[in-house]
Image: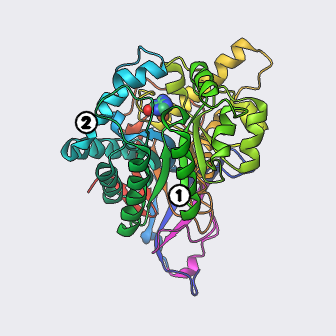
Amino acid sequence: MCGSSPAIAHVYRGTFVHSTPHTALQILEDALLGVDTEGKVSEELNKLSQSCGFSPSEVIQLAQHEFFMPGMVDTHIHAPQYSYAGTALDLPLLQWLNTYTFPVESRFKDLEFARSVYTQVVKRTLRNGTTTACYFATIHTDASLLLGKITNDFGQRALVGKVCMDINNAVKHYKETSEESQEETCRFIAELLKKKYPLVKPVVTPRFALSCSADLLEQLGAIAKNNNLHIQSHISETIEEVNVVKKLFPDSESYTDVYLKHNLLTDKTVMAHGCHLTDEELALFRETGASLSHCPNSNISLCSGMLNVRNVLNHKVKLGLGTDVAGGYSASMLDAVRRTLDTSKVLTIQEPDYCTLSFEEVFRLATLGGSQALSMDDHTGNFEVGKDFDALRVNVAAPEGPIDLVQVDEPKVCDDRNIVEVYVAGRKVVPFE
Ligand code: GUN
Ligand code: FE
């Protein structure tokens, strides 16, 4: 590091908290961490050599009541739905989509409306400590490109998807044909890649099996394969949805098989929910390397179901957490952490032998687990040497600190008021410039 590697830009000293594949929560006290000029962790914690020429005055010293943790990864969030988050939670999923979601999403044809909502959601999630977000946009290509630009401008790492849906939509002005959806997906991918945003990538986004014809699913699978792209969708969120999929795709053995048959289950696929997947379906996830996004706030708010996370982990399926705004009413990943713990406890109440998730495990799911679910763990998720410095500076004694603390043992991260700085790839992105 003192030799040919990129020069060190900053050195931080204090407490660092992160997860590794072997340790759910590792706390390193009085550690040193160097960040190089490319924004990467440049030396092992605790091993930075003072001989690199840093005088103690150049080291950024964290206070006693502060620590760094990895940025959180929201593996599933609908950016346009931020406009009605916290409302309209009185209907089950399929009615909720037609009554509230599709009419609101249809408004994103208007680029000024899109700009306003997308700026708000990116700022809000960054302030809440989401350094990486996997976004659904809407069917509108130009507004989806705008979301990519806004995430780039604010410095958030993101996967952005133009939504594809060609069937089963009761809303007049929110429709596309299979051909339009394919063409616009290709245009979206080409134009987003042309921008060369360093932290923003396109993700192929069939809304879910109920919204896409077999032809569209097949073509989207081919587009993802030909361009080696990420894929995102929804799966087995509610029992009603599972039953309708069975009727629509009688030749498929299961909901998972529908996506598998159309080449949409790969090691770069993230599927939201999966509350009602069978063990056989989980085995298909494991075999293909596809991952799940657990969105407990949404699952409870829409009365969809409760994912048995322990069973998913036992099947060695990659799993991250998601807010699923606006099925989930909170854009905060700290809320997703709490709801994950709550859901696990409710499952324990129902089945006392259930192996409840620990806070440490859930902390890992919100950080490293999310990076793994998005196949980004080679460069994000914790503070290993060589990874990008995506980090939250947490002050547990923040002056405006919340009184209504949810005790999550040590470390205590209560809400966004405790997140005083956010870094993505070494760059400070919160507070906003
Ligand atoms: N399934 C298909 N579309 C959606 C959506 O927008 N939100 C949720 N929660 N589930 C979906
Ligand atoms: Fe969703």
Q: Residue farthest to the left?
A: 112
Using a 10 Å C-alpha cutoff, classify the residue at mark 1 as few (fewer than 14 neighbours), some (14 to 19) or many (20 or more). Answer: some
Sooner in the amino-acid sequence: mark 1 or mark 2: 2
Under mark 1, the amino acid is Ile
Is 43 magenta? The answer is: yes
Name the amino acid type tagged 2: Arg
Whether residue 22 is in magenta: the answer is no
Return the x and y of residue 322 as percentages of the image width and height: 52, 37
Is there any visible trace of residue 400 in the rendered image? no
Helix, strand or loop at mark 2: helix
- Is residue 146 rendered to the left or right of residue 227? left
User: On the image, which quarter does residue 358 sit in?
Assistant: top right
Quadrant including the N terminus: bottom right
Q: Residue at x 35, y 20 (%)?
A: 99
Residue 76 seen by the camera: yes
Front-most of residues 138 and 197: 138
- Residue that badge 2 annotates: 107
Query: Can you give x and y, in whole percent of width and height, for residue 414 in the image?
Result: 47, 33
Residue marked by disc 1: 223
